[in-house]
Image: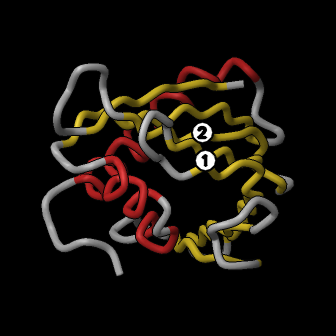
Amino acid sequence: MARFVLTRRSPLLPAVCWERLTAWPRHGERVPFTRVSVARGTGRRAGDVILARTAIGPFRFDDPMELVELTAPAAGRDGLCRLEKRGRPVLGWAELRVRAPDGAAVGTEVSWTEEIRIAGLPGFFDPVVARAGRLVFGRVLDRLLGPGPPTP
C-alpha cells in the first residue's frame, strides 16, 4: 500500500481549518476530472459517505469513503476525521487531523495521512502512487487552507 503524510501550518483557528477540511465538495474544486459530493448523510457524522467520482473520457470510477470517525476540535482536543475507502478500484484509508500546536496562541497544524491501494496495480508502483497522492492532495490541502472566503 502506498502511504503519504502531508503537514501544513495555518494561521487560521482550528475550528476554521476543520470547517474548510470537512467541506467535502470543495475537495474536488479545481481538481481535473474529479468531483466530490456527500453521497449519504450530511457529511458530518460517522456512517456518512463521501463520494469522489473521477471521469476521463470513457474511463470512470467512484471512490466511496465512509466517515468512520469524526471529532471536531475543541479546547484541549484535536479534530480527527477518519475515512475508510469502500470502493473496488481504490482501497485504503485517510485521516485528517487538526490541532493547535503546543504553546501557540494562534494557528493550527493540519495533517493528512493516507494509505491507498489501487486494485490491479502491483505494489511496485506504490512509490509512484504515493508521489502522485502527495502532489494532488497537497494542492487540495493548500487550496482549502489558503486565503479566501470561509466555506459556506
Q: Quadrant of residue 135?
A: top left
Q: Is residue 43 above or below residue 117?
A: below
Indicate the position of residue 151 as horizontal and vertical percent values: 32, 74
Q: Image point 37% across, 62% down: which residue?
A: 20
Q: Which residue is mark 2?
A: 95
Amino acid under disc 1:
Cys
Q: Which residue is mark 1?
A: 81
Q: Is residue 49 above or below residue 21?
A: below
Amino acid under disc 2:
Glu
Q: Image point 23% across, 20% down: which residue?
A: 103
State the SS at label 1: strand
- Mark nearer the N terminus (2 vs 1): 1
Query: Do callouts 2 and 1 mark residues in contact (Cβ within 8 Å)?
Result: yes
Q: Is residue 115 left or right of residue 4?
A: right
Mark 2 packing: few (<14 Cα in 10 Å), some, or many (20+)?
Answer: some
Q: Is residue 15 above or below residue 51?
A: above
Indicate the position of residue 70 as horizontal and vertical percent values: 65, 52
Looking at this view, is 56 or 88 the one in front?
88
Indicate the position of residue 79 as horizontal and vertical percent values: 51, 43
Looking at this view, is 125 or 144 the one in front?
144
Q: Image point 13% across, 60% down: which residue?
A: 147
Indicate the position of residue 96 as horizontal and vertical percent values: 52, 42
Q: Quadrant of residue 150?
A: bottom left
